[in-house]
Image (cartoon, helix red, strand yellow):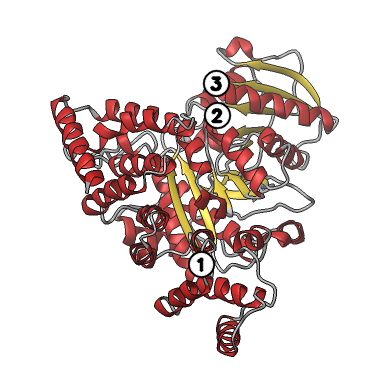
Amino acid sequence: MKRCYSLFILLLITHALVAQQATLSEREYALKYKKAVQLYAGQQYLEAQSELTPLTNRKYTNSMVPYAHFYHALCSFKQNKFFEARIVLRQLFERFPDWDKIDEAYYLYANAALSDNYIDEGMQYINRISGTILKKDIENMLYYHFSKVTDRTQLKQLNQKFPNNAIIAQILVDNIQKSRNVSKEELEISDQLTNRFNLGESTTNPKKSTTQHKRENKGVVNIAVLLPFRLNDFDASKGNRANQYIYDLYAGMKLAKNKLEAEQINVNLLTFDIDRDASLISALVEDNQFSQIDLLIGPLYPEANKIANNFAKSNDVVQVHPLSNNRQLISSDKNTFLAAPSFETQSAKALEYMKTQTIGRTVAIYYGNTRKDSTFAYAYRDEATKAGIEVITIRKFTNPEDIDTRRRPSHVFISGSETTFGGKVINALDKKKVTSPIIAASSAFDFEGSSLTIFSRELSLIQLDYVNRDKDEVKNFRSLYFNEQNIAPSYYSYWGYDMLIFYARMLNAGKNQLRNSLNAIEYTQGYTLDGFDYTNGSNENQIVPIIKYQDGRFIEVMR
């Protein structure tokens, strides 16, 4: 009673202090929350709670509030303050019953209750958990708590109270089998439980037996989507958010999940708002349940990626970079993949195509203002040199005087990110009477605003976001997507859909078979876009769509 009274007084004082504080803006709230998570990651639990306490006030309703409650409870749990953890979690359940991480909160509550020996209460909250991703963690938690019970009579009582619990049955059977002094009745109980739950003759801690094979044939593929959703900045009234492509990507993934379920492939699609700040993912990878992830999609930014990649390597998890063209990301890990081709592969494929379009073996290269433009240009130079093609010039284009007219190149390569850049280079080439065939990054052109005369010349485009609207898969997806979202899909919607289907199918077939499956064939049929090619041991998708304007429309001439 004294304990409850003391806690009640503490809560009243805390509430009074919080009430005196001015309401934080969402930005201020996010900064304090991130600071608290950093403190938690540094095991400074008391300090983290000091930051989190005002963030759990009822006046706040933003998307980070339930996370503030959850981390507050975690801090209490880490300090063995199990009662306090349950109090805060009850507030979370009351205020946010539909929170998308509610199963994790139920799991934490059950752990806290069992730690305080409130067995009935703990088991009630375990029964509330609806998903399957925490199944192994629940088994390990139950084994941890109930394996401390050595009294056989108490174990039999637990078995009678929870007759459908395989972990309790296992511990009871272990106790009976290891004892020399057992009755005939107890041996019969052991046989019955062994037959009912198909228990092995030699039993061990399930944590030991599952960690070796935790991802093999468990019937579900757990996928963590680590992308910058930026929920704190979300405004439904804004139709053109800077990160709209992230929401399009995820919308495609959700439709892919439905298709996979129709194929009897169960997918847990778990989303995490991971931006440039690495503190959130640092805390995330420390959570036990995260060890059951099979596939990481993202993150997009370097600091967060370092932590994610280290986690993937340590836990034998597959990581996919959904949008990057940086080959260095896959240089040191067999289970890290680029979903899109690198600049080097795009260059090699483009050069292979241009060999069929020209006779000579020289090239002039012009690039735009961004780092991406120059990176692509110099990758093209290096691949051209490897292919025995002489690079006449490689330079940044700013005006027509940058066009090299000393020698006529067999072909020209243009790398640009601004949609007006390609037209400017072509106009300059025309003024200098350089009529060589051109291959260019499609990002350098405005497909809607440019004159068709630009596309009508000897111009081929590397267009990774090419969508063939005549494909049945594209037509079907557009219809499904429109019914779900009330808008037409963007390229990223198609990409998210294809990517999730491909990798989930690969992992569902067994991660040990992943490399063999990837080496076997190109996977190009049944996808809305051009599909995936990881043959010959490649860890990057080798499909590079090249298009050309012919007969009044753009058609794919190579991939």
- Of pointers 3 and 2, the one earlier in the residue sequence: 2
Q: How far apart are marks 3 and 1 (CA)?
A: 42 Å
- Name the amino acid, label 3: Thr
The residue identified by callout 1 is 266
Q: How far apart are marks 3 and 2 (CA)?
A: 21 Å
Camera sees residue 186: yes
> Closer to the camera, 414 or 203?
203
Percent from the top left, x then y, of residue 288? Answer: 52, 49
Looking at this view, name the residue that lies furthest to the top.
401
Asked whether the residues under the numbered discs 3 and 2 touch, taking CB atoms below 8 Å apart as contact, a structural biologist would say: no
Q: How far apart are marks 1 and 2 (CA)?
A: 31 Å
- Name the amino acid, label 1: Asn
- Of pointers 3 and 1, the one earlier in the residue sequence: 1
Percent from the top left, x then y, of residue 422? Answer: 54, 27
Q: Using the image, determine if residue 360 lies above or below residue 471.
A: above
Asked whether the residues under the numbered discs 3 and 1 touch, taking CB atoms below 8 Å apart as contact, a structural biologist would say: no
Q: Residue 48 carries which label?
A: none
The residue identified by callout 3 is 370
- Count of marks placed on residues: 3
Position of 99 with respect to 498 (left or right) is left
- Name the amino acid, label 2: Glu
The residue identified by callout 2 is 303
Q: Which of the 4 quarters of the picture holds residue 21?
A: top left
Camera sees residue 528: no
Which residue is rendered at x = 77% and y = 27% of the image? 382
Which residue is rendered at x = 24% and y = 49% of the image? 91
Q: Which of the 4 quarters of the picture holds residue 431?
A: top right
Q: Using the image, determine if residue 522 lies above or below residue 239.
A: below
Q: What element carries label 3?
A: loop
